[in-house]
Amino acid sequence: MPEPLRVLIADDEAVIRLGLRALLEEQGYKVVGEAADGTRALDLVRRLRPDLVFLDVKMPGTDGLQAAQALLANRAVPVIILTAYADREFVEKAKEAGVLAYLVKPVRESDLYPAIEVARARFREIQALRTEIGGLEEALVVRKLVERAKGVVMRRMGLDEAAAFAHIQRQARNARKPMKEIAETILAADTPPSGDRGAGRAE
C-alpha cells in the first residue's frame, strides 16, 4: 500500500481545522500538523515537510496568500487555499499568488479529492516549467500560456489536464524546444486567420 498523503492544515478557527481534519482522515489522508496563522504554518512546513498544505486566506499576521507565495517561491509544497469568499477578485489574487486550487468554506467532502488532485498536478507542472525556465515569475507567466494550450489539446484529443500537459511536454522534448514555443504553436494553429473571423456574418 502506498503511504498516505501527508497534509498540514492552517486556519485560525479551531472548529474549521477539526472538521477538515475529520474529512481528510475519513478519506485516508494523514494530517501531520495544524496551525492557527501563516507564520506558524511556514515553520511547520519547514519542519514536517508535508505533501500538501491547506491555508485559510484570512489569518492573523502572515495570511494565506502571503504564505502561499512564500511556499511556492521556495518550491516547497502544493497549496490549497480555504476561503469564505468565492468572488472573482479573490480568485484572481489567488492565481497571481500562484495558488493552485481553492475551496470555499464550509468544505464539502465531495470537493476535497478533486481539489487535492488538481493542486498536486498543477504543482508538478510549475516545477517542470521552473526546471526548464529557471525563475518562478517567468514560470507562472508561461504556465498561463500552457494552460490555454492544454485546453486546446484537451478539446481536440479528449485528454484530461495531466495527459494534455504530458502531451505538450513530450512535443517540446521531441522537438527540442521550450514548452512556451510549443504552446504558442498550438494556440496559433487553433486561431483562425484574421480574414476568416468575420466570415458568414451579415454586413
Image (cartoon, rainbow, N blue to C red):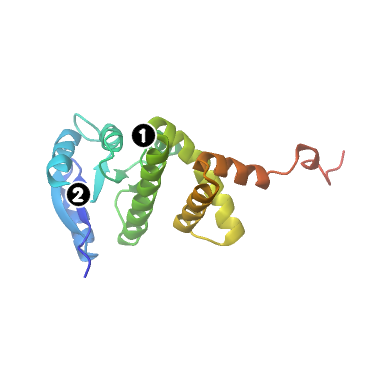
175 or 3: which is nearer to us? 175
**C-alpha gap between disc 1 and disc 2:** 20 Å
Q: Does 10 sit above or below residue 136?
A: below
Report whether 31 appears left or right of 121: left
Whether residue 89 is visible here, answered yes or no, is: no
What residue is disc 2 on? Answer: 50
Q: Residue at x 17, y 33 (%)?
A: 39
Name which quarter of the figure residue 5 lies in.
Answer: bottom left
Q: Mark 1, mark 2: which one is toward the viewer?
A: 2
Instruction: Point out residue 45 in the picture as x, y percentages from the top left corner.
Output: 17, 42
69 or 93: which is nearer to us? 69
Q: Element type at marker 1?
A: loop
Instruction: Point out residue 73 in the picture as x, y percentages from the top left corner.
Output: 30, 34
What residue is disc 1 on? Answer: 97
Q: Does 62 sit above or below residue 49?
A: above
Q: Residue at x 58, y 60 (%)?
A: 157
Report whether 20 appears left or right of 177: left
Q: Residue at x 61, y 43 (%)?
A: 185
Instruction: Point out residue 192 in the picture as x, y percentages from the top left corner.
Output: 73, 44
